[in-house]
Amino acid sequence: MKDVKLINQNFLEKKLKESKEQAQDNSTIFLKWHNDNRKEEAIQSDFLNDIFGKILGYEIETDKEYNLDKEYKTQKDGTKVDGVLGFFTKESKNVKAVVELKGKNTNNLDEIEKQAFEYRDKIDGIEFVITSNTEEIRLYSAKSGGRLKYQSWTMLELSQSIEKQKEFHFLLSKQNLIGIDKNAISNTKKLIEEDIKREDEIKAKFYKEYKDLREEFVKDILKQNQVSNDDAISKTQKLLDRLLFVRFCEDNNFITKPFEKVDFAKQLGFPLWDSMKQLFIAIDKGNPPHIHKFNGGLFATDELFDSLKISTNLLEKLIGFLRLYHFKNDISVHILGHIFEQSITDLEALKAGLTEENFDKKQGKRKKDGIFYTPEYITKYIVEEAVGGWLNDRKNELEIDKIEPQEVPQIKSKKWINPNAELINKYKQYAEKLKQIKVLDPACGSGAFLVEVFHYLENEWLTLSETLKKLGDIDESGLFNYKTIYKSILQNNIYGVDLNHESVQITKLSLWLKTANLNDELTTLDNNIKCGNSLIDDPEIAGEKAFKWEEEFPFKFDVVVGNPPYVFAREKISQEVKDFYVGRYKSAQYQVNTYLLFIEQALNLIKISGSFGLIVPNAWLMVQSAKNLRELLLKECSIKNIVNLTGESFENVSVETIIIHAVKICSKNNAVNILEKQNDKFIQSYIVNQSSFEENEDKSFKIFINDNNNILLEKIQQSTLALSEVVNVKAGLKAYESGKGMPKQTAEDVTNRIYDYTYKFDEGTYKYLEGKDVLRYGLDWSGTWLKYGNNLAAPRTFEVFNGKKIIIREITGQYPKSIIATYSEDVYLFNMSNIAVLPKEGSDYDLRYILAILNSSVISYYFRLNTPKSIRQMFPKIILQDLAKFPIKKASAQEQQPFIEKAQTMLTLTKQLNEKTKAFVDYFVGKFKAKLPTDKKLKLTRNLENWHTLDFADFMKELNKQKIVLFSTEEFDFKPLFEREKQACNELQSQISKTDAEIDKMVYALYGLSEEEISVVEGLV
């Protein structure tokens, strides 16, 4: 069951006290609805009128403006909604909130949550979602927290508490929820945003102090004890974990006054550390009436831990720190999840610091082991699809939906026979399946997925129990027992493995925090959550971390979920490990990435008809190095959903991802749902037959194009030659790599870039380009020179850099001008951030003809929809293998000539514009640098470099930012020159844009595109 409120309760109560609003006592109305058991259809209108009309002040439908509409249909598909709140007239509908109503026979509102949020996705402008079964009513934000957080009230508690009525009115009244008019900002929305900011500040402050204290304890333990660095860190973490758990239990009323005896012993003169150890024993073994037996392993005897000497002042500081926060209202379980995950990174930094190693945070555990925290809404979605999908398949096998439930009378005769007996039996068979499900996260990290699995299964048991009650099952009372069920879920349904010992301990703690209660022991998790290498079972390769699945878990799993590590071969995977992967995994090809292996491992670990749901980088859908994996999936799986998570899915991580949900059973006619992420929701884009992936080159999963795109792409490729057939396509050089070059470069050589110069050092030194130096039809050389020869790590042949060539930047531009390419006959060295296109012997194709096509919108369209790394929002790039396949229209020398002339015009105009803009930059830098303070140099910002795009006032503001202030007379004298130069540049830019458009038009005609098809190319987002 979810326990995350939309608004922190303490914060809400504080705001209520500050508010001057008064709520009338409507206990009678709330009590009436508590006692009303009518069916859904009969009560909807009355409920809306009473609760939203009479109590909350929403104007019900009138001839003028009103706020509650009970006949609203969605814009997208005409679905009728139970109710919407907003501002409505006969002419306009401005919806702010959607209301989904059920009758009291829907005991669990989680069941209608998904349906209510689907209405949100069909109506523009929704800010809130409200659900109710006429007993409970819930308020969700349509954006902040989504389905994960809500505020809830019951009719019974509202009828009994005027304070609860005030809270209800404060958040849901017309004035506060939707505002006084359609342009007003919701007070409730502002309150939610303020609370989010407050929570973020608390989380940041708490973690900083937590981290600093941990470092102090480690140093103190090392100073006072003869222990290793690893032991000092491990025991410090154990102390923190124990005390966090104690404070959590205290604030949630699971333990009464745990520090009372510690304080009392201290007053009697007993050492604080000894008293704390006695507390831990009491929690482990139990000490009624204040402390029941928790056990579970967290407080088990640890001789080394118990033998440590720890400074009293530090222990007092730690206890004082933890007592500053409330571990229900201030630091909730989901906040602790983020804190635990961050601990993995900082523990790695701490270890490195103690051994005086250089530690790059980017190379900490999050990067080195590929660990990333998954946002809650994604975790929830994956678990719902994978675990929920598997359970729904079991229901379908039992044909539960084919049996219509019959109404059960409240008063039954002695001879009454339950008409639902067959359906009850089916549900009890389903209960056996539910008991036996086995769900694995093979890289469990901080335990986020396993905690969500626990929530899902717990809720499924509640729903099943309530369903059997409705069906009149007299034996149901023994079906759901919280103590039995949660222990059964933890012991029999949830499994996790992680390479990091810290992650294993944190996962256990996360699950214990979720299941701790006043009466029961903690569930021992050693047999379920284990430390090991999920991909390697050979001790000679992985040492003690080698993980033999058949020994550790001698069974197959029903479901695998998770966010596996993303570790590339280039990121320090040893050759020995690479060789093992290639020998063991079908998906391991010349480029190894661990997430590909985890997908294959998921297949290996699940039963036939098992399900997996994973979030992984999107590159594998189309890259050549993942072809074997795609073939394996197509052969063994029915892919249910692929969700395109546009942009970043993780804080501070530049990786774009997709969610894949598949079942281990192959169906020839399987339909794959392709969904798009919009904010924190997933919208179906289209459906594609899985067999269409089989037909693609390299079995690529082209999920970013539909049938219409495919038809146009096929037309573009008609009567063309692959680029590599008419020219040579070559990679740039690699200047630096430790251990490469003659003489071999050292790490220090690489850091210092010893062959870079700011001048021509000798005859073997040449102008050097990086990716940023290449423009469309031009170069903006940064002034770097590079000494060329065998001294470089991978110099390539000199012919790549000398003579006629097209230079293409690897990182692409914004569509529809994705490809950034230019032409040069001068000698320029360039690195692998650029690709060279060179003349091919025997080919009649002029490079400038090729250049015009490459820089066209048609090729950008082809690139955007047909290559694996083009669809990234973060650093989309073109790779050599894809470039080589670009379709170049066959053309005679005569047919090429108009394109050659236009390309040459673009090269000339771009060069003139670049020279003119740079000349003016040089002029004003020279003119105004004397006005700078003596300790400051003029920094050329992007705006100053592009001065010709600014008006004079904005240009002066940029100069002012550099501490350059002109007298009014100086401004007056300088302005005419600025305007004259700007006009000249703008005239050149206008000619460039005109010529560029003419080339596009010529290329459209060359490839035979109609006006409608041109609109498709130019309209692609």
Image: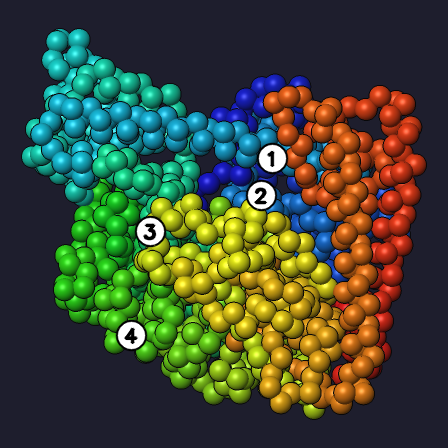
Lower position in the chain sequence, tag 2 or tag 1: 2
Q: Residue at x 55, y 61 (%)?
A: 830
Query: Could you say which is closer to the camera, residue 903 or residue 277?
Result: 903
User: Is disc 2 surrounded by few (<14), some (14 to 19) or many (20+) residues within 10 Å?
Assistant: some
Could you tell me the amino acid type at mark 1?
Glu
**Numbered disc 3: secondary structure:** loop
Secondary element under disc 4, as helix, strand or loop, is: helix
Q: Which of labels 4 and 1 is toward the front?
A: 4
Label 1: which secondary element: helix
What residue is shown with label 2? 144
Alpha-carbon span between mark 4 and mark 1: 50 Å
Is any part of residue 821 visible from this angle? no
Image position of 429 (left or right of 918): left
- Circles 2 and 1: CB atoms closer than 8 Å: yes
Q: Position of residue 648 (x, y in %)?
A: 54, 53
Mark 2 or mark 3, earlier in chain: 2
Q: Position of residue 445 (x, y in %)?
A: 33, 51
Disc 1 or 3, which lies upstream in sequence?
A: 1
Residue bearing mark 1: 193
Image-based side of 908 in relation to 196, left or right: right
Viewer-nearest of discs 2 and 3? 3
The mark nearer the N terminus, 4 or 3, is 4
Toward which corner of the image does residue 215 lie, by quadrant?
top left
**Residue annotated with mark 4:** 582
Mark sitting earlier along the chain (4/1): 1
User: Going 18% across and 43% down the picture, which residue do you hit?
Assistant: 296
Q: Quadrant of residue 924?
A: top right
Residue at the extreme front:
763
According to the picture, the residue beneath numbered tag 3 turns out to be 746
